[in-house]
Amino acid sequence: MTQASSQAPIRGVWSASLTPLESDGRVAHDLLAKHCRDLFARGCAGITLFGTTGEGQSFSVAERKETLEKLLAAGISPAQVTVGTGCAALPDTAELTRHAASLGVAGVLALPPFFWREPGDDGVYAAFAKLIELIGGAKTRLLLYHIPQVTGVPVPPAVVARLANEFPGMVAGVKDSSGNWDNTVALLKIPGLTILVGHEPYLPRAIKAGAAGTICGLGNYRPELIRRLHDSAGKAEEGRLVEVVNKLVQLVTGVPFVPAIKTLMAAESGEQRWLNVRTPLLAPPEAERRRLIAAAQGFDAEAKAAA
């Protein structure tokens, strides 16, 4: 049976990295590497490429391979990288997974079959089982990606438990971005899995319940805050930090999340390439950008006062 990599556990704060773009839509490889180094310096243990926040489904197989190769060539350690490899076609997912595994990344983030709605538990199980068959002897760790509000297809705890039992070691864990605490609790009851939450306000509670950490989008913009939230589990400042992070979540979820975060990154860094997104996403109009930036400045002032 195929076994996973023997790399260090995936724990702590991992940022679901944005994908910076040139004005013509190509990946801005220099800015991506700079961003990753900055995230590590500011408290992130690792990054995930081409997840939801990274606009993964907007890039071709070739683009995703090239981006990973160039990021590692820029000196980013593969042990600090996980990669979203999900595609609508399983052979493409398998190709990206084998490629990532060959480069020694810490793991891959695997989506359920998201185009064919209502496949049922057996269909979701079959899709992941077929992926494992297709990647053959590739040594990597699969993190199953549960984000039903985006994919329309859940990865239920019963299916996770079945896959973990059938493919021990290979099925290493779950990224639970559902924002459903009961689902997270059910996943944490499955022995031997790495559970990472995507909904940032749950992070301290999840850590106390046995979760390994988070892969989250807000880590791009305020990594120090998310790291403090992670480290606050069971401490006096936990409740206050959860309130602060909840306010940041509310600030960026009233509009499409990725353009909102990219807008704030551009405003803070002065790097206008952060404003570029791939269709069907669109950069916010100027009035909306000004509103977002003003709201973020208000949030920062409030967060500083609460520190």
Image: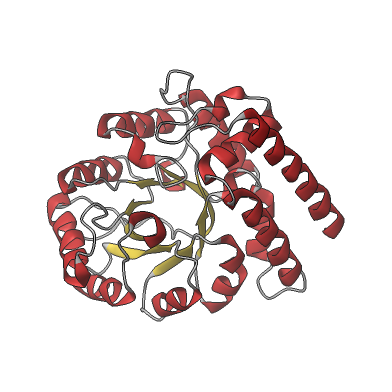
Instruction: Pinpoint residue 206: horizontal percent, then vertical percent.
Output: 54, 72
Q: Residue at x 28, y 66 (%)?
A: 169
- Residue 257 visible from this viewpoint: yes
Quadrant of the rendered structure where residue 100 is? top left
Horizontal side of 273 relative to 122 (left or right) equals right
Residue 2 appears anywhere in the view: no
Residue 23, position in %: x, y? 48, 19
Colour treatment of the image: secondary structure
The image quadrant of residue 56 is: top left
Residue 156 is situated, as x and y percent measured from the top left of the image, at 32, 72
Q: Is residue 160 above or below residue 101?
A: below
Direction from residue 299 to residue 113 in the image, left or right: left
**Residue 8 at what x, y percent from top left?**
43, 57
Q: Looking at the picture, tell me which residue is in the foreground, 47 or 240.
A: 240
Image quadrant containing the N terminus: bottom left
Q: Is residue 237 above or below residue 51?
A: below
Q: Residue at x 28, y 77 (%)?
A: 158
